[in-house]
Image (cartoon, grey):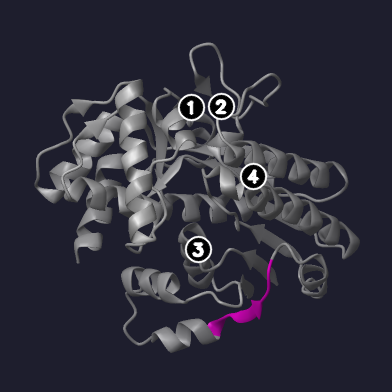
Amino acid sequence: MILLTGSTGFTGSYILYELFKRKEKVLALKRYDSSFRQIEYVFRLMNNDRTITFDDYISYFKWADGDITDFLAMDNLLEGVDTIMHCAAFVSFSKAEKEKVLETNVKATANLVNSALVHGVKNFHFVSSIAALDRNSDNISDESMFPVNKKFLSTYSHSKYLSEMEVWRGYAEGLQGIIVNPGVILGPVLENHSIAQIVNLIRKGFRFYTDGANGYADVRDVASFFYELSADQKYYNERYVLVSENVSYKELFSMMAEALNIKAPNIKAGKKLAHLVAFFDRLRAAFTGRDSVITNEMLSLISSNFFYDNTKVRNATGREFIPVKQSVKDMVNLIRE
């Protein structure tokens, strides 16, 4: 039996469908108040067998309501579980949510590793992040780079590094598994997701871009690579960068605008202008009651140039990634629908 955390989230919902395709036995963990909207979205998108209904799909899995920060609840779930796929995480770049980020990402992972060791769980597979990697003097990262003197640009990136260290500790104490480090994840998603909000900003005429660059991966690739690597012990106790391409924010926003058939953002935002835009975004959030999209931590990230080497996973699997332009096109078209 596989315990999947984060099953109703963006990445988790695609991993859940991957496990369904492979006819794996799954105990899917969700929060008490979680909606099945993202899961249904993925099912409608990915399922080609019209004899299978969404109710059939939901009924295939065993479900558990719980909070991954609740140690006792998680501990009680592990009877009969031989594999944990841990992809639940809390993503925020807001200082006000620093403690929640650390508790959800670090403390909960440590507790889950401890419970796995106590209950004799054999395999522990983890969705980490490129944010957990160090980089060389050219700002290039690969799987061999563990932070030593790295200054983390956000609480989230620090939390993913600390979470990953808990998983490596678990491997040292007897667990086995794989760690994947996805780039910024793109692809078909519900309209309330942060990446969809950026698409909507550009749709509404957002004119700015920064000089930064980052690595990106399609969520469908993340799910399929994660399953393929987890299914073969020859890949175990290693980590793998899951990045399709390194793309500048100007290029990414231009791809989004092209898919929307509108003019691309064309005003380069220097430091002062970027902070002014962030200020007005916070005002917008205050008046509308919605979350701010552009925070100071986010500004630091999108003003930096980070590049990632995916050679290891391509050589290991013989596979290539969905191009970023295709991911953006699919994402924008489905958001518009």
The local secondary structure at tag 3 comes to loop
The residue wearing badge 1 is 309
Q: Which residue is mark 2?
A: 142
Report, in whole angstroms, how far the alpha carbon at label 2 lies from the one at label 4.
13 Å
Label 3 and label 1: CA atoms lie apart by 26 Å
* Quadrant containing the C terminus in the rendered view: bottom left
Viewer-nearest of discs 3 and 2: 3
**Type of residue at label 1?**
Asp
The region drawn magenta spans 60-67
Crowd rating for badge 2 (residues with CA inside 10 Å; few <14, some 14–19, many 20+): many
Q: CA distance from mark 1 to mark 4?
A: 16 Å
Image marks 1 and 4: residues in contact by CB distance under 8 Å: no
Disc 3/disc 4 C-alpha distance (Å)? 18 Å
Mark 1 surroundings: few (<14), some (14-19) or many (≥20) residues within 10 A:
some
Q: Earlier in the sequence, mark 2 or mark 1?
A: 2
Report x, y in % for residue 83: 72, 63
Residue picked out by circle 3 = 9
Q: Is residue 248 visible?
A: no
Looking at this view, is 239 or 96 the one in front?
Answer: 96
- Of callouts 3 and 1, which one flags the residue occurring earlier in the amino acid sequence? 3
**Is there a contact, CB below 8 Å, between mark 3 and mark 4?**
no
* Viewer-closest of 113 and 108: 108
Of callouts 1 and 4, the N-terminal one: 4
Q: Amino acid at mark 4?
A: Ile
The amino acid type, in three-letter code, at marker 2 is Asp
Residue that mark 4 sits on: 179
